[in-house]
């Protein structure tokens, strides 16, 4: 797939499995090249890319830990060399940290990782580009609501990533880039189907609007806000 023929170039992080993989699959289209990014599950990422191509889309894979500055820089340089641009960036992966890490460690790692990736991607994104951050209600409402036992560092890390991207909104606007957060209820018995959550993310990636999208039950109305 050459940059001259592709109408949309999309990078989905954490796309080898789960919501990220489903989002990548839902973005498959003849005019779209989906870059399936993973940290280390290259075989699974390859399977996702193969499924996209079988559905009539175009895809390739890349392996990079978003916490690794050199790996992320290399990934973006490769996208620039191959395609010359990036139309959509779906930030589904978190920086590398474990549930045993302190909340402060997780916050620092993910804050730096998400900001760095967005900053490196922006020069490749044309006006009308879209950045979507994928999170869950437990992280989105942290620390104002209780989180499941053992999930504090994960929630803190995801929340830090969202907060730092939210603070970049004026920078995104200067570049003509829309920024959307999609938060889903994924950790309890009322969670939406994975495909429903992924549909909200892929829809946001194609919407050319900024705001927040809630999927599934929340104490606040499900809405999109500016």
Image (spheres, rainbow, N blue to C red):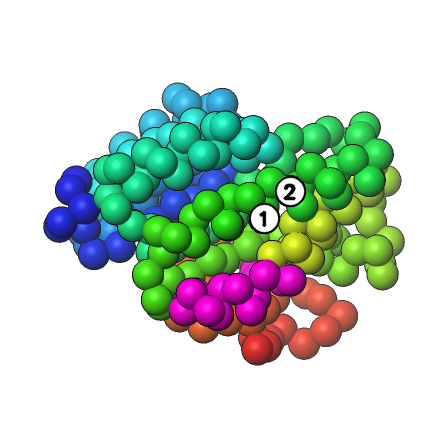
- Disc 2 secondary structure class: helix
Residue displayed at 68% across by 57% down: 163
Left or right, 38 with reference to 191: left
Q: Residue at x 47, y 58 (%)?
A: 131
Residue 199 percent coordinates (x, y): 44, 58
SS at mark 1?
helix
Is 47 on the left-hand or right-hand side of 131? left
Q: CA distance from mark 1 to mark 2?
A: 5 Å
Q: Quadrant of the N terminus?
A: top left
- In this view, the residue in front, 175 or 97, is 175
Q: Are marks 1 and 2 in contact (CB under 8 Å)?
A: yes
Q: Which residues are magenta?
A: 166-182
Q: Is residue 81 above or below residue 212?
A: above
Residue 127 vs 108, above or below: the answer is below
Circle 1 sits on which residue?
115
In which quadrant of the rendered view does residue 222 lie? bottom right
| Count of marks, rendered view | 2
Residue 217 visible somewhere in the drawing: yes
Dot 2: within a 10 Å radius of its alpha carbon, few (fewer than 14), some, or many (20 or more) residues? Answer: some
Q: Position of residue 21 (x, y in %)?
A: 44, 41
**What numbered label is drawn on residue 112?**
2
As drawn, which residue projects farthest toward the left? 5
Left or right of 105 on screen, residue 38: left
Residue 96 magenta-highlighted: no
Residue 169 is one of the magenta-drawn residues: yes
């Amino acid at each position: 797939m050459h940059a001259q023929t592709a109408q949309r170039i999309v990078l989905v992080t954490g796309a080898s499995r789960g919501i990220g993989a489903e989002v990548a699959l839902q973005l498959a289209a003849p005019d779209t090249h989906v870059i399936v990014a993973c940290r280390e599950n290259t075989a699974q990422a390859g399977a996702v890319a193969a499924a996209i191509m079988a559905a009539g889309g175009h895809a390739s894979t890349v392996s990079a830990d978003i916490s690794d500055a050199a790996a992320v820089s290399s990934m973006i340089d490769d996208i620039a060399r191959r395609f010359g641009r990036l139309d959509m960036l779906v930030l589904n992966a978190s920086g590398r940290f474990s549930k045993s890490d302190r909340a402060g460690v997780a916050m620092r790692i993910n804050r730096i990782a998400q900001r760095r990736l967005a900053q490196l991607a922006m020069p490749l994104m044309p006006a009308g580009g879209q950045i979507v951050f994928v999170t869950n209600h437990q992280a989105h409402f942290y620390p104002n609501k209780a989180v499941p036992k053992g999930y504090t560092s994960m929630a803190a890390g995801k929340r830090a990533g969202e907060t730092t991207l939210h603070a970049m909104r004026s920078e995104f606007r200067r570049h003509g880039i829309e920024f959307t957060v999609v938060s889903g209820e994924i950790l309890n018995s009322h969670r939406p189907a994975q495909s429903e959550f992924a549909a909200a993310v892929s829809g946001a990636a194609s919407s050319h609007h900024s705001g927040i999208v809630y999927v599934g039950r929340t104490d606040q109305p499900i809405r999109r806000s500016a």
